[in-house]
Amino acid sequence: MIERKQYLEQLISKKDNGMIKVITGIRRCGKSYLLFDIYHKYLNSVGIDDSHIIELALDDDENIKYRNPIELGKYIRSMLIDKDNTYYIFLDEIQKVKTVKNPYLDDESETVGFVDVLLGLMKKKNTDVYVTGSNSKMLSSDILTEFRGRGDEIRVHPLTFAEFYAAYNGDKRDAWQEYYTYGGMPYLCSLNNHRAKAQYLSGLFDNIYLSDILERHSIRDRNMLDDILNVVSSAVGSLTNPVKIADTFSSALGVKISADSVSRYLDYFIDAFMIYKSQRYDIKGRKYIGSPQKYYFADVGLRNVRLNFRQTEENHIMENVIYNELITRGFNVDVGVVEFNYRGDDGKNKKTNLEVDFVITDGSRKYYIQSALTVGEESKRLQEVRPYTKIADSFKKIVVVKDNVIPWHDENGILYIGIERFLLDKSAIDL
């Protein structure tokens, strides 16, 4: 069993806090398993009997009756027979519950939905409510508004490299090659050949992710979604924006699409937890720069299958893995920009922007991170750390390399660390 320890700890810390715990994340990343297996076993271990754990998988046809919110509310309340002890209510795929007309009112506009049921249950003194949701009826933007400040979100991601390696039968180097190729969707751990893994990842796109978006937004042109995803897949680790993507469609595909349409489609992918957007941050000016940005996939295996595993450039994929690792650890992650003024060969003053791959913050903690395949040659090392020489503050500066190196610091205090150590040891960035 893969422990998903950090998510279990979040659930434990939010237990009995009077809020609705909403477990979100890209579909098939392990939300249901976290709740129904891992957290259920934890509750048993601290003395909660199964008679006080109410579980409903709303995507199961046996529970189809409870997709009616009125029936769902009646059923759960009928189970709350012990007034002196807490019941833990687990509702999986809550978005399956439909909105229906309020049968007690004549006004056709008066409806009842799953939010009404959950808010009602939350107000009972002997309930603690947990739900999962991720598809076309319950995406990230909805969660911020539906519960009116009474929902407590727990974002679940695909397996980190550390979680993947804990379940992997082999050495770290082989595990890394497997991970940057196929990613960390949990079910892949049960598959043992390329064809099966590629078919599974492709099926997630065809049968779940894109279908959800098409249904939610009533989109008829599936090809446009596919093409935008492919362009974004190729641009992982590169600065881009909707205008540049629209230009790519025009020049490479001979298709006209507006930048506004591209931006809207990208927001659909972000809402479905498929991709993330990282803003550019002016380190010296301490301000955000609107455009361009970088886009990263929630799982690198999903990115790779979009391109039929043809563009597996380890440098871009490694950068994506590092980004995912950082957000999983709870950091705010931006792309850093350092403006550099210099005198050109013609004697004129000029300026350029140097890029820092990641500026990460967590409260008062702040780090700068560069991703590099190697710094074996001195010229390559100096190129990677050049932006750091233009940053005057004293926050930690790190270069993560593919090479399996013993962590070391140069004369400027910059830390160099191998990707495997970085991913497996959360404390390594503070060496």
Image: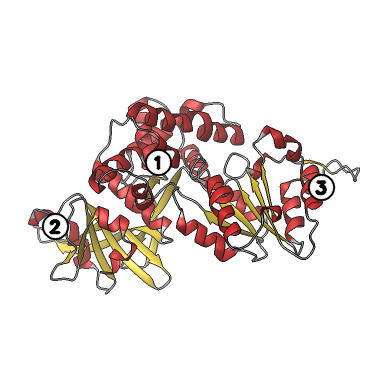
Label 1 neighbour load within 10 Å: few <14, some 14-19, many 20+ = some
Tag nearer the camera, 3 or 1: 3
Q: Nearer the viewer, residue 189 or 258?
A: 189
The image shows residue 423 at horizontal and vertical percentages of 31, 55
Secondary structure under the numbered disc 3 in the rendered image: helix
Secondary structure under the numbered disc 1 in the rendered image: helix
Sequence-earlier tag: 3 or 2 = 3
Q: Nearer the viewer, residue 303 or 20?
A: 20
Q: Nearer the viewer, residue 364 or 125?
A: 125
Q: State the residue at coordinates (47%, 26%).
A: 223
Q: What residue did someone put label 2 on?
A: 381
Q: Examine the rendering and report whether any part of residue 142 can be seen.
A: yes
Q: Examine the rendering and report whether any part of residue 355 can be seen.
A: no
* Identity, as a three-letter code, of the amino acid under mark 3: Lys
Mark 3 to mark 2 CA distance (whole Å): 65 Å
Mark 2 to mark 1 CA distance (whole Å): 33 Å
Sequence-earlier tag: 2 or 1 = 1
Q: State the residue at coordinates (39%, 58%).
A: 333
* Image disc number at residue 243: 1
Give above or below for 337 relative to 321: below
* Identity, as a three-letter code, of the amino acid under mark 2: Arg
Q: Is residue 136 left or right of residue 206?
A: right
The image shows residue 236 at horizontal and vertical percentages of 33, 43
Q: State the residue at coordinates (40%, 41%).
A: 243
Task: Indicate the quadrant containing the C terminus: top left, top right, bottom left or bottom right.
Answer: bottom left
* Image disc number at residue 63: none
Secondary structure under the numbered disc 2 in the rendered image: helix
Q: Is residue 388 left or right of residue 249?
A: left
Tag nearer the camera, 2 or 1: 2
Mark 3 to mark 1 CA distance (whole Å): 51 Å
Q: What residue did someone put label 3 on?
A: 74
Tag nearer the camera, 3 or 2: 3
